Every structure is written in C-alpha cells, then in structure tokens.
Amino acid sequence: MNKNKLLDNLTYIIGLVTIVLVVVLSKHMMNSLIVGGIGASLYGIASIIKKERTGFLIFSLGVGATISTLLYRFDVFDKFDAIQFMIGISVFLLMALSGVFLFIKNKEVKSRYDLIVEATVVDLETDPNTKKEFYKPIYQYEVDGLSYDVAYPTFINKHIPKIGSKVKLMVESKDPLSVYFEESINSKIYNIATIVFLLIVSIIVLIDVFK
C-alpha cells in the first residue's frame, strides 16, 4: 500500500470515528466538542501530510475548539471569552502554519528549479473557448545549446507580455522542460500582507481575552 493510499484510509477512519463519537456523546456537549476538536486536529494533521492546504484550516479549528472548550470546562473562561479565544487561536495557528508552508514551499521550489534562464516570448496562443482576449504566452529559451519552447500553464487576460519581451524563468537543470512560473509580485505582497495582518489581529484578540 503506497503512502497516499494509507493516508487516504487514515483520514477516512479518523473522520468516521470522530463523527460516530460526536453523535454518541451528543448529550454531553463538552465531551462532544472536545472529541470533535481532537478528531479535527488529527484529520488536519493527516491532510497536511498529504499536502492538502485545507489541512491547515481543519487543524487550526480543531486545536482552537479543543483548547477553548477545555478552558471553559475548567472555568478558566466564560462562554464569551472561550469563543473569542477559539477564534483568536484558530486564526493565529492558521496564519502561522500558512507562513511556514510558504517558506518551506519557497525553499523546495528553489532547490528543485535550480537553473535561471532568460526566456523570450515567441507567441501568444489565443483561447478558442471564449471571444474575450485570453492568451497563453509561449516562451523560448536555451539550455546547454538546445532550444526549448514551453507554454504558460493557463490562459490569462491581465499582465499579458508582448511578443519579443524577455523574462526570467526557473527551470530544472535535469529536465529543462520542467518550468516553475512564479507568482506575480502583487500576489506575493498580498499573501504576505494578509498573513501578517491576520496574525496581528489574532494576537490582539488573544491579548484582549487575558486582560
């Protein structure tokens, strides 16, 4: 049994067991919430190992629900503070994990796509499925004296390069046809700014709980 199949079975079992226990313990709300939170956390971990981004959200919500419910059960927080804490810690964990994910992904990309080449836009392929102006740039570059043509993975209608323009591409030295197209600068700034902003908001929420 391969790793992905094993993880698929594991997440299925975790999800099924969690649902059954939550239903069985439905008359005991606190226990039901704690079991649901633990189950969601484990499901999220398995999903993260499978490299599914939804795993970060599920794990964060699961941990937040578990901790806040325990704190409420032991009279550390009242109901309002427990809910506020759950929101704050869940958002904090989600953003922290997202930041770590982006950092690791960036390192993996640089390690795999270890060759920077200068490519020229040689053609703009039109999208035959729409009358709107959507184009797929075709890039041409050389590696070890051999010429390669590669198309952008999707059709785009913004920031369309002109034919003849130059661009830097990240290429696998072992497989020159394997290309990584980086996100635009605007997209990178937006992602980082969103993470930082929500981290700050979540910290403020958590500090307010402990006032």
Image (cartoon, rainbow, N blue to C red):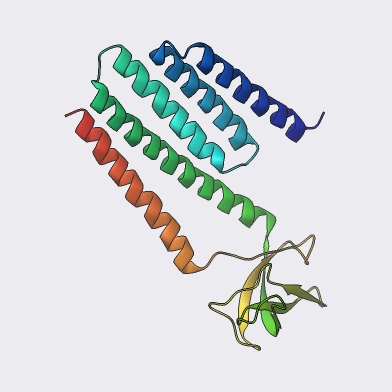
- Residue nearest the observer in this picture, 46 or 33: 33
The residue at the far left in this view is 211
Q: Residue at x 51, y 34 (%)?
A: 58
Q: Residue at x 49, y 38 (%)?
A: 57
Q: Position of residue 168 (x, y in %)?
A: 62, 74
Quadrant position of the N terminus in the picture: top right
Q: Residue at x 46, y 14 (%)?
A: 26
| In-image side of 203 versus 90 (left or right) | left
Quadrant position of the C terminus in the picture: top left
Q: Residue at x 44, y 27 (%)?
A: 63
For residue 2, which quarter of the picture?
A: top right
- Residue nearest the observer in this picture, 117 or 210: 210
For residue 169, which quarter of the picture?
A: bottom right
Q: Position of residue 74 (x, y in %)?
A: 29, 11
Q: Position of residue 156 (x, y in %)?
A: 60, 74
* Number of marks in picture: 0
Relative vertical location of residue 137 with respect to residue 25 in this rendering, above or below: below
| In-image side of 82 versus 180 (left or right) | left
Q: Position of residue 38 (x, y in %)?
A: 49, 21
